Amino acid sequence: MAKKNARPLRTVLFCAGTEEGEIREAFASGADSIVIDLEEPCTPINEQVRDMGRALVNRMLGELPLGGPMVFARVQRPATGQTLKDLRAVMCPRLDGILVPKIDSPADIHMTEGLLNSMEVDLALPMGRTQIYPILETAQALRRAYKIAKASKRIAYMGGAISRFGDIHQAIGFRVTPDARETLVLRSKALMDARAAGIRYPIGGMWTGKLNDEKGLRAWCTELRNIGYFGMMIGDPRLVPIVHEVFSPTKDELDYWQRLDQLQTEAERTGADKILDGDANQGEAHVVHGAHVESARMNLVWARELGVI
């Protein structure tokens, strides 16, 4: 899928590739996408457990109906030498893409793409159909995020993989605080690199607070949305409704964007030389410029792709 055709994903819901019930619950949760985890579905993990997971996921991908959420699998990174084992288990028409963890550079993407090319030919799947979703959770990946995003046409989604005490903590060394100020620069850099590389809908990292802290979750989602993210990774289906609400346009936003679109259309019809909106105290927004209309129309495309208008 080309970057320009990527659909918005408000939720990227992870589930263990060793738990059939968890996979079925995730698929039925209403999430926009799910990630079946084969890299680290449980702890401790060994090759015997991974083999059981591969067999389970292979069977379930053959059973999951078309439609519904996009389906990704998190596989082991190429440096482990185990990626092909995971791909043999998951590559099929129902799989939309793979998440590649702990990458360091574009070379990891190139190796992954080579494996996908071979698998698609072997399985008579359309060349290039399987997406690559890089997870930015090393210092090297965060530093090279733009080059990583540009490394393959298969990359349609990317963003910062913030977690409370996981790989990204090991890479950077931050200490998690309730307001997450310590990761704002990381999230912002990943966002700008992704957008500069043509990623339409960047995706943020995990909520690090308590599952029953609705106020904290809303604040986290709102900040991600405010700085430019369009969705986030989650690890529990109970978070789906709130995350979807925050990462969807509000009624006031939709009304404003539609009004600017209509004002521009009417001005073109009548030949008006100026478009005014609201009272003069609005400042820059009072006199409508072409950039305002373009922004409104871009956001309306997002809303249509979400199905909210």
Image: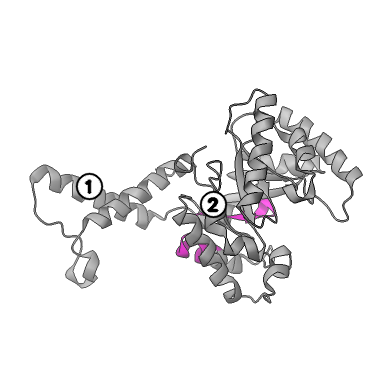
Is any atom of residue 229 visible in this view?
A: no
What label does residue 262 carry, if any?
1
- Where's residue 289, x and y in %? 21, 58
Is any atom of residue 304 visible in this view?
A: yes
Residue closest to the eye, 298 or 262: 298
> Residue 102's image quarter?
bottom right
Residue closest to the eye, 48 or 63: 48
Q: Callout 2: helix, strand or loop? A: helix
Side of 185 relative to 238 (left or right): left
- Where's residue 166, x and y in %? 73, 64
Say which residue appears at 60% left-offset and 63% top-offset: 142
**What is the crowding at mark 2: few (fewer than 14 residues within 10 Å), some, or many (at least 20)?**
many
Say which residue appears at 67% left-offset and 50% top-offset: 237
What label does residue 44 carry, if any?
none
229 over 182 or under it: above or below:
above
- Reading the chain from its start, which is encountered first: label 2 or label 1? 2
- Where's residue 177, x and y in %? 65, 77
Amino acid type of the residue tagged 1 in the rendering: Gln
In space, the residues marked 2 and 1 are separated at their CA atoms by: 36 Å
**What is the crowding at mark 1: few (fewer than 14 residues within 10 Å), some, or many (at least 20)?**
few
Side of 119 relative to 144 (left or right): right
Q: How many marks?
A: 2
Say which residue appears at 81% left-offset and 43% top-offset: 19
Amino acid type of the residue tagged 2 in the rendering: Ala
132 over 278 or under it: above or below:
above
Residue closest to the eye, 108 or 199: 108
Q: Which residue is mark 2?
A: 149
Q: Mark 2 and 1 residues: CB-CB less than 8 Å, in contact?
A: no
Magenta residues, as a range? 221-238
| Residue extending farthest top | 124
